[in-house]
Image (cartoon, rainbow, N blue to C red):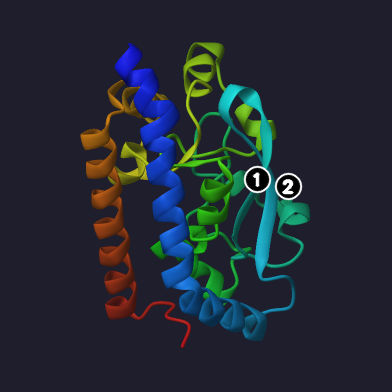
Amino acid sequence: MMARQFYQKYIKRGIDFFLSLLGLIFLWPLFLVIALIIKIDSPGPVFFKQKRGGRDGEVFAFYKFRNMVRNADKLKKKYASLNEANGPVFKIRNDPRYTRVGKFLSHTGLDEFPQLINILKGEMSLVGPRPLPAKEEKQIPKKWQIKRRQAKPGLACSWLLKGAHNLSFEQWMKLDIEDIRKSSLSYDLATLAKTVFLGLSLVIKEIKGGNHFPF
C-alpha cells in the first residue's frame, strides 16, 4: 500500500508533468496547424472548455479542440433520440453537430491533445478514467463513482483500447476500476503506449478511408 501511494503521489505525478510538458513543447506546431484549420473551417473558438468531474469529485475546466458547431450544447436536446450510449452519458459517433474538421479530429483523437494542459496543471493524469461532464459524472451509480473518484481522470485508459462507446456503460465502469486497481509504472506505461499506437492507427485509417479528411 505504501509503495502504491508513493507511486501515485510522486512517481506518477512526475511522469505526468515531464511527459505532458515534453508533449506541449514538441507538439505546438501541430497545435497551430489544427487551430488554423478549425478557424478556417467554421466560426467559433479554437478550444472547447467544459466543467468535468475530477478526483474526489472536484470540478475542473477541461480543454479540447472544438469539434462541433458553436451552439452544440443548445442542440443536444434536439438530437437526444440519437444517443448511442447507455448510462448517464451522451454520445453519437457521427454526431450531426460535428464540423467537417471536427469529425476527423474526434474520430482520430486529435481533439484531445489540449488535455496535456490539464495534465501539466495536475488536474488529470496521462492514464486514468476518462473525465465525464460534471453533470453526467454526478449521475454515476455510487458503487462505481466512489472508486472512480479515487484517481485523477486520464487521457489514456483501457476503455479506449477495448472499444470505447461500443462497450456498455457497466463494462466501461469495470474497466475504469480495473485501471485504478492495477495502476503501476509498468501498467500505466503499457496503457499509454498502446493508446499512442491506437491513435496513430486511427489517423492512418481515416486518411486512407478519405471519408471526411479535412484537407
**What residue type is disc 1 on?**
Ala
Q: Which sits in the foreground, 54 or 68?
A: 54
Residue 211 horizontal/vertical position (percent): 39, 77
Q: CA distance from mark 1 to mark 2?
A: 5 Å
Query: In the visual, does 189 lie left or right of 35?
Result: left
**Looking at the image, can residue 104 be seen?**
no
Query: On residue 167, which mark appears?
Result: none
Residue at 45% in and 54% down: 20
* Image position of 7 with respect to 2: above or below: below
Q: Are marks 1 and 2 in contact (CB under 8 Å)?
A: yes
Residue 111 horizontal/vertical position (percent): 51, 63
Q: Residues within 10 Å of mark 2 (few under 14, many from 20)?
A: few
Where is the N terminus found, in terms of image quarters? top left
**What residue type is disc 2 on?**
Lys
Query: On residue 80, which mark appears?
Result: 1
Query: On residue 77, which mark appears?
Result: 2
Residue 70 horizontal/vertical position (percent): 74, 66
* Image position of 200 with respect to 184: above or below: below
**Snapshot quadrant of residue 213:** bottom left
Q: Residues within 10 Å of mark 1 (few under 14, many from 20)?
A: few
Q: Secondary structure at mark 1?
A: helix
Residue at 67% in and 39% down: 60
